[in-house]
Image: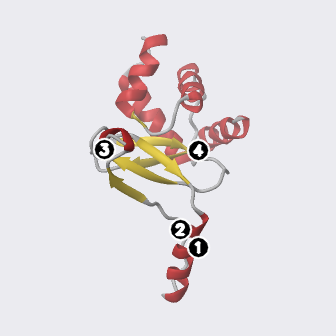
Amino acid sequence: MGELKKNFKAYLAAQGLKTTQQREVILDAFLASPSHLSTEEFYLKIRKKHPSIGYATVYRTLKLFSESGIAVERNFGDKQTRYEVLSDEEHHDHLVCTSCSKIIEFEDPEIERLQENVALRHGFKVLNHSLELYGLCADCTGK
């Protein structure tokens, strides 16, 4: 996580922005949080320990995380932007429950190979991709 912090600080400096104490607090909390929090969910979490940090500051800082490349914005069809730490770990995809909104990350090398083969057959060079499957989780189907 130290590398992500360093990258974010370098991005701020390159943009002529300061590393403020509030940004530091938000960054530390973000890196320690579970993935896929919406701005509202993350703000409510931050507010518990740091009531002086406002919603607009959290919103702008999350946007900066995305712009700097340390986070990625995700939209799972619920009209809320969610944020996920962008790491060097293996690519993963998502199962999204349309009933309870649970988001399950998964990795499947076979799916990755199939996607690469489809792209090759069409002469397409994939730069990035996102796969989300929508349905009902085991809890919502009673299994």
Q: Quadrant of residue 70?
A: top right
Where residue 70 is drawn, which disc sits there? 4
Q: Are marks 2 and 1 in contact (CB under 8 Å)?
A: yes
Dot 2: what SS?
helix
Distance CA(mark 2)–CA(mark 4) = 25 Å
The structure residue drawn at horizontal position 59% and vertical position 32%, both measured from the top left corner, is: 31
Distance CA(mark 3)–CA(mark 4) = 35 Å
Q: Is residue 8 left or right of residue 142?
A: right
Dot 1: what SS?
helix
Q: Nearer the viewer, mark 3 or mark 2?
A: 3
Precedes in sequence: disc 1 or disc 4: 4
Distance CA(mark 1)–CA(mark 4) = 26 Å
Where residue 113 is drawn, which disc sits there? 1
In which quadrant is the C terminus drawn? top left
Q: Quadrant of residue 125?
A: bottom right
Q: Is residue 123 above or below residue 109?
A: below
The structure residue drawn at horizontal position 58% and vertical position 39%, both measured from the top left corner, is: 16
Dot 4: what SS?
loop
The kind of residue tagged 2 is Ile
The structure residue drawn at horizontal position 59% and vertical position 30%, both measured from the top left corner, is: 18
Disc 3: which residue: 141
The kind of residue tagged 1 is Arg
Precedes in sequence: disc 3 or disc 4: 4
Distance CA(mark 1)–CA(mark 3) = 30 Å
The kind of residue tagged 4 is Ile
Precedes in sequence: disc 2 or disc 4: 4
The kind of residue tagged 3 is Thr
Disc 2: which residue: 111
Q: Is residue 91 above or below residue 60?
A: below
The structure residue drawn at horizontal position 67% and vertical position 51%, both measured from the top left corner, is: 88
In which quadrant is the N terminus drawn? top right
